[in-house]
Amino acid sequence: MKVAIVCYPTHGGSGVVASELAIGLADKGHEIHIVSYAQPFRLRSFHQNIFLHEVGVSSYPLFKYPPYALGLATKLVELVEDCDLELIHAHYAVPHAASAYLAKQILGSRRIKTITTLHGTDITLVGADQSFHRVIKFTIEKSDGVTVVSEYLKQRTIEEFDIQRDIRVIYNFVDTQRSAPEHVDCTRETYAPEGEKILMHASNFRPVKRVGDVVRIFAKVQERIPAKLILIGDGPERVFIQQLVKELKLIDQVYFLGEQDYLEPLFFCADLFLLPSEQESFGLTALEAMACGVPVICAETGGLPEVISHGETGFLFPVGETGKMAENAVDLLRNPERHESFKTKARSRASQCFNADRIIPQYETYYEEILKSGDHL
Ligand code: GMT
């Protein structure tokens, strides 16, 4: 197949899923054209069968906001014509799905199919914003195919936008080969020289991630057992979090590593991963942690209960219940046998249910179905 994959290039789940999908499909011989405003961070090295196309948007004094959606649509039209593409797969509704729809209309009689993958905040946060609501609903209805990353997100999309059409659930996935322990290159001693336990969190430091809760959970844990916290990522809340760490007198115990392209090497240093988000349509970082044998303590929200098995691979507690999260973290860390069993189950759940070898063929099959189907106009 010859496919255009449209995605965000920045550190974030939707860009990771789109890039890893591109790699998986290209490995199987499909011709994949990545369309984005910059090179996605997971596609910096060379991959056979992957072609990168950056969308540039001219800036004129008249434009307060450069019209990226139109530049993207134009790029897609050119690519479909020049490279004879069959399918545009837009990751994230805003504005990618709208640009794909526009490209399809411009191409007219030339047959091209569009698939939109909804990732979460395009429905739960951006979608709830009235200024985008009608366009998102329209593009969901008009895409030839729509996938979502969890059953939760499917229900949420149907309810939020009153959608009647079919929506396919295809879960996020991990390359469990890359999560194999022989790839370890992080040493615990660097972060925990006295043999302390290591807790970890990775996100884009947006309010929806409740990184403040991560710090509060850690503050309670380290009162009872020697521990360190590693925070990975960057975003609008970082300054506030650094302030909170100072106020709680935890500076010597918390490491801010900034954005990292791959989390696996660091996960091998971790004893627990914390994800107390307000909302999480799936929680790709939780899955990546599990794949490396790291149990996850997270909020019982969104799609996380579909990923984490409570009492087996981690714990789920209501949003904001930092006390319970900390208490269970301490109990688990103090019980090496139980901790070991959680680690084993986390790794095996990730590889049995969410392995790339299992999920990428689901996208391939869906592509084939959509290519065979009639137009969805
Ligand atoms: O909020 C993020 O983590 C970024 C966001 C994105 O679109 O890049 O992530 C969303 O998509 C991921 C991949 O499908 C999901 O695993 C995340 O759960 C989802 N984030 C939220 O729903 C908050």
Image: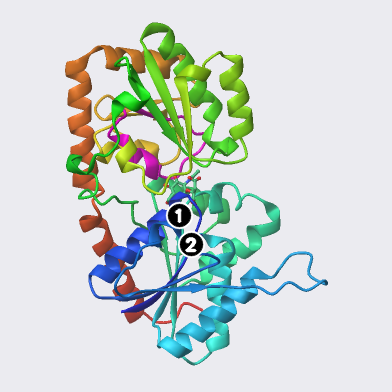
Residue 59 in the image: state x and y as whole percent: 73, 72
Ligand 1 within 8 Å of the CB at mark 1: yes
Q: Residues within 10 Å of mark 1 (few under 14, many from 20)?
A: many
Identified at 26% across, 57% down, the residue is 359
Is residue 139 found left or right of 178 in the rendered image? Answer: right
Q: Residue 358: x, y in percent?
A: 21, 56
Residue 284 quadrant: top left
SS of the residue at dot 1?
helix
* Residue 274 belongs to magenta span: yes
Q: Which residues are magenta?
A: 267-288
Which residue corresponds to the image point at 52% horizontal and 24% vertical from the top-left?
A: 213
Q: Height in image: 42 above or below 83?
A: above
Considering the numbered disc 2 on the image, is that residue within a helix, a strand or a loop?
A: loop
| Colour basis | rainbow
Q: Marks 1 and 2, Cα distance to the nearest angstrom?
A: 24 Å
The residue lying at 39 percent from left, 7 percent from top is 224
Looking at the image, can residue 271 be seen? no
Vertically, is 337 above or below 223? below
143 lies above or below 334: below
Q: Is residue 133 magenta?
A: no
Nearer-the-camera pick, 138 or 280: 280
* Horizontal side of residue 374 vs 176, given as left or right: right
The residue sitting at the bottom extreme is 109
Q: How many marks?
A: 2
**Residue linked to disc 2:** 164
The residue located at (57%, 14%) in the rendering is: 248
* Visible residue check, residue 377: yes
For residue 14, the mark is 1
